[in-house]
Structures are given as C-alpha cells and as structure tokens.
C-alpha cells in the first residue's frame, strides 16, 4: 500500500474521532436542556395541583358561610312564626324554612364531595413533589456528568487535532485537498476496494481502475463517488471466501430483542440500515445511511414490539445479522463505527448472495418474493 494511503487512512481515523468528539460535545447541553424541560413540566404540574387544593379550600369556606347564613335565616323564621296571625302567613314561613333546609342539605353534599376529592388532590401534590425532587437530583447529576464529559472530550479533541495536523503534513497537498473536499460531502474521503467494487458507493470499478488500485503505484479515485481508493489483499481474501462457506450464513433469530434490516429506499436517504430494539414494552428505531453509517433523522420510540410498531419499515426489507448493546449504541452518537458498518455490509452481501442462489435453485425454502411469483 502507498505510504500516502496509509497516512490518509490514519488521517481519516483522526477526522472521525474529531467529528465524534465534536458531536458529543454539542449533544451534551441538549440532553441537559431536555431534562430541564421535563423539570419545568413537573413544576407546572405541581403548581396546578397546589392551586386546585387552594381553590377547594376557598370553596369550602364559602359553603360554610352559606350554611351559617341559612341557619340564622331559619331561626329568624321560627321566631317570626310565633307571632303570625293567619294560617297562610304560617304556611308561607314554613315553606321558607323547608326551602332553607333543603339548601343546607345540598351545600353539605358539596362539602362532602370536596372532602372526598381532597384525598386525591393530596396524593397528586405529594406525587408531583416527589417527582420534582427526583428530577432535580437527576438534573444535578447529569449536569455534573456533562461538565466532566465535556472537559474530557475537549482535552481529547485538542490531542486529536494536534495529531491530525501532523498527519496532514504527511500527505501530498493536492491529494489532501481532494480527500477533504470529498469527506465534506460524503462523510468519508477514502474507500476500500473489495471484489472489484468501491465499498464507499458500492459501484463496480472499471477493469483499468481496479488494476491501478491493486498495483498501488499511484493514487486512484473512484469515478462514481470520487473517494480515494485503496486495496487491502487480506480483506480481499475474506471477501472471496469459497461459496460453500458463504452459503452457511448465520441466520438472525426471529425473536431477538434487536434486529437489523437493510432497505433499498428510505425517503431521500436512499439505501439505509435500520436497527430496532425491543425493551420494556417499547420499540426504538435507528436509521443509518448505508454508505456513511451516519444516523438519518431522529431516533424513534413507539409502544409495543417493533414488528407491530414499525410494520411499514420492515415490509420488503432484508433482515441482517448484527447485535450491539443498547448502551454501546448510545455511545455511537450520530455515526456508527466503521467496524459495525463493515460487518453489516458483509452480511448484506452474504444475504443477497443467498437470496440469489436460492432463487436460482428454487429450493424448498424460497426467497421472499411477490405473491404472484411464490410457489404454491
Ligand atoms: Zn465510490
């Protein structure tokens, strides 16, 4: 391999690490802001519950006054009834007294209702207070962690920038400019050639280009994606494993909590790898650009298991092997590591190869095909 290429590969590693650190540094305040937002919501909830308690207390006082007033009215009517001259006057007073008594009973019912509600209100307030306390403690912890992580990241970033500057000095100026321009647009500026294909864009190379890359006498760029190409004989050997070995592809378990898929079309993103995780009754979906390994869009979370939560994504997609701990994936940030991306590419190739050979052999377990082509 050309020394230039080796330097460029090291430079690419440095660039990746720098990007990862920069992304992580940018992400940390967002996480803190999200928790702070939640904290504000809980605070508002508590204030609402407390206001409801106050309103109930005010109503209670109002009802108590109403009852006192009605009672004094009744006693006034009773006094008056002693002095009445006619039967009609007496009846009228009696009617007033009955009316007031009814009102007292109705008001007492309202007070009882308030007392029953008070228990529930009390629970609401206590729950909101406990939640607030827990969230406040969590946010403090997160802030401290974010600060420490940021400081550590900044330190590493400075080191990597220093290393990168040294590496840049080891690469020819024109090549460096080309590499940086392509990196800016495509996420990576250098790509391996395997099985006559550019691994960056998956396009077959012309025979002359392929030979130029293999001989390694000069730097060659991909006609299709413009990435600088290199060839590693050790990897090529693996890619060209005997067919019987390939056909023994390990098959993903149907009930695994994590599942990877390849989709040919995903909106504007084109070809993507999708990862679904089932945990605690929820399904999480991550989508990655299949060439750069960059995260496409937001991480989605839906209720239920992923087959039911994201049926539209799985239909027509190719299931792949791949399993990374959720905790590890969280450290990926906005880009999956090259090792993960490579293993998905290798498995996709194997899966596609398997599908082609199966279709050709028309075996008993046919490849998924549209209904009209499916054997009966
Ligand atoms: Zn290419």
Image (cartoon, rainbow, N blue to C red):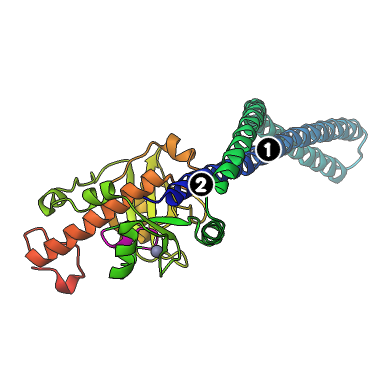
Which segment did they paint magenta? 195-201
Relative placement, left or right, of 209 versus 36 is left
Decide which of tag 2 and tag 1 comes sooner along the chain.
2
Instruction: Identify residue for label 1.
Output: 36
Q: Nearer the viewer, residue 50 or 183?
A: 183
Magenta part, dominant SS: loop
Where is residue 336 shown, x and y percent of the image?
Answer: 44, 46
* Magenta-span inclusion, residue 196: yes
**Residue 106 in the image: above or below residue 357:** above
Please tell me which residue is depicted at 27% across the width and 50% down the height of the picture.
233
Q: Tell me if residue 315 can be seen.
A: no
Where is residue 106 shown, x and y percent of the image?
Answer: 71, 38
Q: Characterize the local packing of mark 1: few (<14), some (14-19) or many (20 or more) Cα atoms within 10 angstroms.
A: some
Q: Quadrant of ligand 1?
A: bottom left
Where is residue 198 shown, x and y percent of the image?
Answer: 35, 61
Instruction: Identify residue for label 2.
Output: 11
């Amino acid at each position: 391999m050309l020394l230039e290429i080796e330097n460029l590969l090291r430079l690419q590693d440095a660039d990746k690490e720098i990007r990862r650190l920069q992304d992580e540094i940018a992400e940390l305040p967002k996480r803190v802001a999200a928790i702070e937002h939640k904290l504000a919501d809980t605070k508002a909830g508590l204030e609402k519950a407390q206001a409801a308690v106050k309103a109930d207390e005010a109503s209670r006082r109002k009802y108590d006054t109403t009852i006192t007033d009605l009672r004094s009215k009744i006693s006034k009517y009773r006094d008056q009834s002693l002095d009445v001259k006619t039967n009609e006057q007496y009846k009228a007073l009696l009617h007033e007294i009955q009316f007031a008594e009814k009102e007292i009973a109705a008001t007492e019912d309202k007070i009882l209702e308030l007392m029953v509600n008070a228990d529930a209100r009390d629970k609401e307030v206590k729950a909101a207070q406990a939640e607030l306390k827990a969230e406040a403690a969590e946010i403090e912890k997160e802030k401290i962690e974010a600060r420490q992580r940021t400081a550590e990241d900044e330190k590493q970033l400075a080191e990597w920038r220093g290393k990168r500057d040294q590496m840049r000095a080891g690469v020819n100026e024109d090549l460096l400019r080309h590499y940086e321009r392509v990196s800016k647009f495509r996420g990576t500026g250098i790509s391996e050639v395997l099985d006559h294909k550019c691994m960056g864009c998956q396009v077959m190379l012309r025979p002359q280009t392929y030979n130029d890359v293999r001989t390694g006498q000069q730097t060659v760029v991909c006609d299709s994606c413009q990435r600088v190409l290199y060839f590693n004989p050790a990897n090529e050997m693996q890619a060209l494993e005997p067919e019987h070995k390939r056909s023994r592809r390990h098959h993903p378990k149907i009930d695994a909590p994590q599942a990877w898929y390849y989709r040919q079309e995903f909106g504007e993103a084109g070809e993507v790898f999708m990862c679904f995780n089932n945990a605690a009754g929820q399904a999480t979906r991550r989508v990655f650009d299949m060439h750069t390994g960059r995260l496409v869009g937001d991480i989605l979370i839906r209720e239920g298991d992923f087959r039911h939560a994201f049926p539209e994504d799985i239909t027509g997609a190719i299931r792949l092997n791949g399993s990374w701990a959720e905790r590890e994936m969280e450290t990926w940030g906005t880009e999956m590591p090259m090792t993960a991306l490579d293993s998905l590419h290798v498995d996709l190739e194997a899966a596609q190869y398997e599908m082609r050979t199966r279709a050709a052999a028309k075996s008993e377990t046919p490849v998924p095909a549209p209904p009209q082509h499916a054997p009966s």
